[in-house]
Image (cartoon, rainbow, N blue to C red):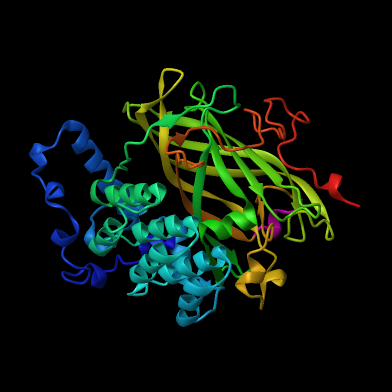
Amino acid sequence: MAIDLCNKSPGALAEGAQGAWEEAVPAEAAPVNLDALTADQRDALNFSYRTTLPAMDPRFVAGDPAAWASDFGYALNKVAVRLDNRTNQDLRDAALNHPDPAMREQALFEYADRDLPDAIELLGQAVLHDPNREVRWDALWAIEKLGGAHAVATLSTFAKDADPEIAEWSHLFRSELQTGDPAFDGRAGQFTPGRTFDETIYLLIHCDLYVRLDDSNQHWGKISLAPQGLARIYGQAHACPNVSTRERQLVIAKTIDGLHADGSQHCDNYLFRGFTDRTRRDRGNFFFESLVPRTFFKSGHADDPSEGTRQANIGFARYGTWHLDPKFQIHDEAAIRYVRGRFQGWGYLNLARVAGRSMEEILQPGNGVLSTLHDPEIGNMTNAFILGTFKGKLNDWDGDGVIDMNSRDVYSTVDGEIDMNQDGVADQPGLTCCDHTTLLP
């Protein structure tokens, strides 16, 4: 999240500091008179303005500081110390040369989060040369987060990339910076009948993990997790909506590779419920919450019961906007082509497991667990505030030139129960996460 504040200081915003907008914005996107906008466009512009207020320097805005100065994550970012103590040069070397794509990406996001003046150049190098497509599209996202004319110009250079997903992400992010809304390419979509979910949307998730270092509440640490690093620890997530219920519930289905000793995937599903505003036909603004039973591992490492376990209810919140594409139809309704938003929750990071360790040792499957403040036994162990952003769009996963709406394998029923054979029936009623006891010797 704090990466979104980078490149936004008065100095960075000064005329000439980022290059001229006219060099980055095509003529057809030149500013227009407010009176020339439609009612919907004026509403969107007003909404975009209001949503930027919490992140703006109060010298540039007027109004109640309860609105613009109450973001807990941004407050923590001002005082937290980085738990990644690599030098800037170490980060550059890792970003371009580390053999593990997740570690290259982690170095890129950490470098960008430090608000360094050449961050966009480094990210652009990764998009241009990295052999891993996820590193490439996640680096594009980091460029969007930094924003500004330089970001728009850099994103534009990848608009005709040979990989259609890179090209579309570039086009989408550039459109968001220029208009506030995403834009898509013209590929056709394919829906597969008979599957549990109408859509399975692969999510990119970035977060800041703020850790309370002692009981004084005066010392905080921070780890900024890039999408692949976060997925390695907590699981790769898919948003799984059905057209008939998407305005009130959906499942976030996660899998972790490399956690179980027997090599099987760890499955971890969350049923979210909430409200969706549908006053506009082309999108839905939502606020959803989840409350699920989970085994809490006091070791701070999933699947490690060596220090005891506790059954607890874990809460999480996600909110944002999904955008429909009328060209993609599911049950006579427009499909969700793209989703973006924020999330927040609580966690436990065992500081003894990370102190003095390298990022390679920290970014391990299950090396961090979600938590709650409300359980009488583990509430006081909760020491991490998790705040982040997510984005996801439909992709062509098999390379046939057609976008796949619901082809991804997700192991969940519509209510979030584990369903390993994907037949829509729970393997064990009520079980929403792998039971670690079945894997014990």
Q: Residue furthest top?
A: 332
Where residue 124 appears, as percent x and y from the top left, is: 36, 66
Task: Give the image location of residue 126, x and y in percent.
Answer: 42, 66
Classify 417 as above or below 332: below
Please say if 254 is above or below 210. above
> Magenta segment: does it hold 379?
yes
Position of 28 with respect to 243 (left or right) is left
Residue in view at x 60 percent, y 60 percent: 384
Query: Magenta stretch: residue 191 in it?
Result: no
Which of 286 and 22 lies nearest the eye of the viewer?
22
The stretch of residues the image draws in magenta is 377-382
State whether residue 330 appears in this view: yes
Query: Residue 84's x, y, as percent?
Result: 55, 74
Residue 253 falls in image quadrant:
top right
In this orientation, which residue lies closer to the viewer: 245 or 375? 245
Residue 334 occupies quadrant: top left
